[in-house]
Amino acid sequence: MANGTWKIARGKGGAQLPLAIVAVLAIALVVLGKAQSSLFDRAHTYYSDSIAPLLKSAGQPLDGVGKWMSGLGGLLDVYQENQRLKEENARLRQWQSAALVLESRVKRYQLLLNAVPDPSLDAISARVIGRNNRPFLDTLILDAGKSRGVKPGEAVVDARGMVGRVFLAGDHTSWIILLTDLNSRIPVVIEPGNIPAIMAGDNSDDPALEPMSPGAPIKEGGQVVTSGDGGLLPNGLPVGAVVWDGSAFRVSLLADAAAADDVRIVDLKAPPEQPPVVTPNDLPAAAAGLPPLVTTHVLPGNGASAAQTPAALAPMQKGAAAAPRKTAPLVLPSGNATLPTTTNTDDHPDQ
Amino acid sequence: MNERLGTSISGTFAAAVPFVCGLLGVIVTNIPVSVLRGTVPPPLFSLMAIYFWCLVRPDLMPPAAAFALGVLEDFLSGGPPGVWALSFVITYALIDRERDAFAGLSGFAALLGFAASMLVASMSAWLIASFVYGRFPPLVPLSIEFAVSVVVYIPMAMLFGLIHRHLVGPLRSEF
């Protein structure tokens, strides 16, 4: 130990950079990193791709030791645990049959209502080969990358619920930012009530819940699922339950990242639903089976007017998606005079 | 001639030992495999090497070495660039300034000396991360890392002492 048993060197290396210059370099690196946070991203993925085989071989025995150590306490009450699991299994079987009945009923209702089906989901199974728990970053490394179709932003789930999302994808590995991480913010809804909120990680076990509308009636025990806003994450992925920590609402996560060994990377196949293209037939009058509308333009000064049908107006519009400014004649009670009025049914994209 | 060459090679090797220890410390800290399955942050081994050799052989652990170890720590940890680099440089400046006070400590007091350095490193990293993220990160993970690092410093200081005696040694002018 540095206790003075050996002499303390006083000499300074002649070639060393002065402390001030190094400090300036470090500050510059911080500023550069803030301006461009993806400074090391490519290097990170290259690094994890390189060490992936080593992690796979070294991780298994260590994981085994970890599991063995964590299971030591459970040896003493293994009989009670077994009984409890049997009872739980019986209850879950009942719930499973109820869920199957409800699922088929929902499908039938959807068919009757001609409802838009849920977007199709595809999933890639992957194994956790690394865990990085640092004070400012909480990540997992998976053994699946771009070569298997993994893309940044995709949700990662385990058997119980959402674990995190992909933030870096290398060729053969991907880095997962956990829901508990400081940088994690995902849109969720709280059931019942369909209350939209943002779940923000802060490196604690239970991420914070920030409702979109202040004063929303959030109750402890409410279920938190992904909302699917933004079109990147699928909606309805189970996340956790609302808990109150004495000062704010938080989310007790269903998934346990520390115990997760095998996970699924969920790929949302369907793109976000686009609004349908507006056609002249969609105009209220045409849709009601009435004759085409007559537009009367009153020219200033001479009182002359010009009549145009919506079809004649169409070439003036830029693009099919542009909503037409529908002009509907206002018929006065006498039935003779017609005054032109313009109804703006939608915001024009050019405005 | 051969004897002089051999002395030169061994001298170069000895000079590289402190930095290599720091380098190994960064790598070990950031190996993404843990017996505790990532529930506890790993100790900051690289700062232990910086602290130890900044006290006993500052010529072999210059500020540039501390900066380089910090940059590597930032890179391997996957955190925001520059946080640990600047934090290590700040801590180095403190140790360099108070070297006489720190080096005179022995036993439990020496452990307190490292704890003070670790506290400075943690707090400066926290402040820099707050600047980068635009909000204050929680202190709990940093506190755990601080505690784990201080506890682990005890065997590590013994190990560094052995390495120093057998491989590095004092400055030639001090024989």
Image: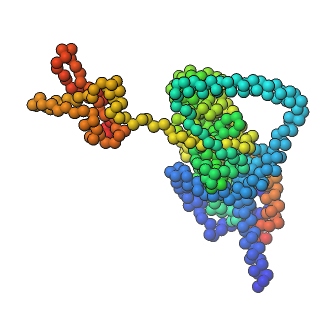
Left or right, B131 with reference to B47: left
Instruction: Classify A242 as above or below B73.
Output: above
Vertically, is B64 above or below A255? below
Colour theme? rainbow
> Of all residues shown, which one is farthest toward the top?
A333
Q: Picture coordinates of residue B55 (x, y %)? A: 72, 58
Residue lying furthest bottom: B1
Q: Residue at x 78, y 83 (%)?
A: B2
Residue visible at 26% across and 40% down? A316
Image side of residue A299 versus residue B161, left or right: left
Quarter of the image where the N terminus of chain A is located? bottom right
Is B1 above or below relative to A12? below
Q: Residue at x 58, y 56 (%)?
A: A42
Q: Nearer the viewer, residue B25 or A334?
A: A334
Q: How many marks?
A: 0
The reply to whether residue A340 is visible in this rendering is yes
Quadrant of image for the C terminus of chain A: top left
Residue A48: x %, y % from top left: 66, 55
Is A291 in front, or is A252? A291
Q: Is residue B139 visible?
A: no
Q: Which image quadrant for residue B165?
A: bottom right
Expressed as whole percent of the image width and height from the top left, the position of residue B65 reads 65, 62
x, y percent for residue A13: 65, 68
- The residue under the point 69% across, 65% down is B59
What is the quadrant of residue A248 in the picture? top right
